[in-house]
Image (spheres, coloured by chain):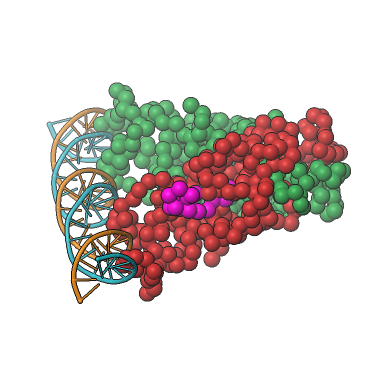
Chain colours: A red, B green, C orange, D cyan
DNA sequence: ATCAGTTTGAGTCAACTTGACTATAACTAA
DNA sequence: TTAGTTATAGTCAAGTTGACTCAAACTGAT
């Protein structure tokens, strides 16, 4: 939509009016590629917390899939795929996530539409990228195979296409949202202690936070609710369990959902 | 890009592999439409400050274009058009802006990719929407015609497609950015007084702000610089002129530009 | 039973920020 | 010269933040 004009150059639809006949094929030549509309793909940057091998403390991990064909055959890339006609962008991201990693996200938000001319050497592709958070219980069950593997977010190596830049941007966004919005809870289960929330912040922002000040700040946010429950089993005073009562929504797809 | 799979269901490219032959035409039937890839359009929400007719104080205005064909023929819509193959998303937005309104934006940022299934009654369209700020000197020169007209942002009436929702979201984003980031200056020229900055805030946020407190806060931001110049000509003490020294960049397209 | 070790959770205090408000400065117009 | 207007500095109380102290409540070892 959004096809508008002043009655001079443009004609209603993007390509329609010329009655272009386009043959898509994997070996399309340059002329054919130039007349084809840019392909549209959906990708997702998925974040989960998993214990680091060294320290055991939670750290940020991202699942990637290995490319099994050119371009960038053999390199790791973000999970993604085409957009089908019967699903919205967010549904496509969701489906994609499920198909490649077996995961159901607890938070899913559009990140950005990447459409630079030379993102792929073979084709003009516009990628609409989402970012997702999954809970550790989910992440532990996630499919892992020869072609799907989890990586520490700070040790990714060189990825296919412009995916390193996309991950950097997703990380920036995640840190930003964490600092300003109630997002940390989507990394956790329904009940959690304030220390667990702090561990999320410490892992994502890569800093140490003062426990006393942190709990004061978190407790002052309205989206969190005390329960009467306590987490037993530690070698110390049992911490109280809390529950998240807020709703995610900020972007247009989520804003109206009640 | 981002076409990845586990070697089972998917095949490299979205549609390519089946060697589909697709005929695009304005009267394409349902079967043809379903096999065509979703069309990609670029639209822009353009904001400028113009004096209100009633009070004379600056208020937010948006240029719209009239649709000259179905669907929604006769209704007002956001300026937009197709994405060509030789331009990036941002360039397409920029060109579009220039072609429909004659404007050059002083700020341009991606807003969101809208891709709901039923946004257009005739076609599946994914719109990548940008939002732009233009300076009032520019806005005053802007083309206006039978099919291009400026509207007050708070009095738009019913627009084509889902454009009312898009404008609402753009407004929300503008207000957010204004509150947290150095964005107000893009509504103004190179030199400005602190009172002018305050007028921008008051117009966009639709509130009254205390002049003394406002100047204290603004002066504490590093992106602003005192000049030795003063604005003469008022019926009062001449205010000092300031200059904006920061850079816009936050999203991936702008982050690296030095 | 008691004690050492741990984390939870409340509280204190100084530095800083914010909103409401006062006062003076510097111009124009009458 | 004076009234009107906005610019700009400053004060003060309330609220927030970061560094820090300390008691509470558990476990495990002695």
In magenta stretch: residue A28: no
B54 or B197: nearer the eye?
B197
Q: Is residue B62 visible?
A: no
Residue plotted at (37% across, 28% down): B243
- Residue B75 place in picture, x, y as percent: 67, 49
The magenta-colored residue range is A43-60
A29 or B236: nearer the eye?
A29
Examine the image and state in which quarter residue B98 appears: top right
- Residue A37 place in picture, x, y as percent: 75, 39
Overall secondary structure of the magenta stretch? strand
Residue plotted at (74% across, 33% down): A122
Residue plotted at (33% across, 28% down): B225
Pick the quarter of the image with the C terminus of chain A: bottom right
- From the viewer's perspective, is A197 left or right of A61? left
Q: Is residue B256 visible?
A: yes
- Residue A161 place in picture, x, y as percent: 64, 36
Residue plotted at (25% across, 31% down): B237
- From the viewer's perspective, is B202 left or right of B1? left
Q: Is residue B199 above or below residue B87?
A: below
């Amino acid at each position: 939509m959004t096809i508008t004009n002043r009655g001079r150059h443009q004609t209603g639809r993007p390509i329609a009016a010329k009655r272009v006949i386009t043959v898509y094929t994997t070996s399309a030549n340059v002329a054919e590629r130039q007349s084809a509309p840019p392909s549209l793909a959906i990708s997702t940057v998925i974040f989960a917390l998993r214990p680091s091998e060294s320290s055991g403390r939670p750290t940020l991990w991202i699942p990637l899939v290995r490319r099994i064909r050119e371009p960038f055959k053999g390199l790791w890339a973000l999970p993604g795929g085409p957009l089908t006609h019967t699903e919205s962008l967010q549904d496509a991201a969701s489906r994609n996530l499920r198909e490649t990693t077996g995961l159901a996200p607890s938070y899913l938000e559009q990140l950005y539409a990447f459409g630079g001319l030379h993102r792929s050497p073979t084709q003009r592709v516009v990628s609409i990228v989402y970012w997702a958070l999954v809970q550790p219980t989910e992440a532990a069950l996630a499919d892992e195979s020869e072609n799907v593997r989890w990586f520490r977010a700070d040790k990714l190596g060189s990825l296919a296409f412009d995916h390193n830049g996309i991950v950097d941007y997703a990380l920036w966004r995640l840190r930003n949202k964490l600092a300003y919005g109630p997002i940390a809870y989507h990394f956790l289960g329904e009940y959690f202690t304030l220390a667990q929330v702090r561990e999320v912040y410490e892992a994502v922002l890569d800093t140490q936070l003062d426990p006393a000040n942190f709990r004061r700040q978190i407790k002052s946010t309205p989206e969190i609710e005390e329960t009467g429950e306590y987490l037993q089993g530690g070698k110390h005073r049992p911490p109280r369990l809390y529950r998240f009562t807020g709703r995610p929504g900020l972007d247009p797809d989520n804003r109206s959902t009640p």
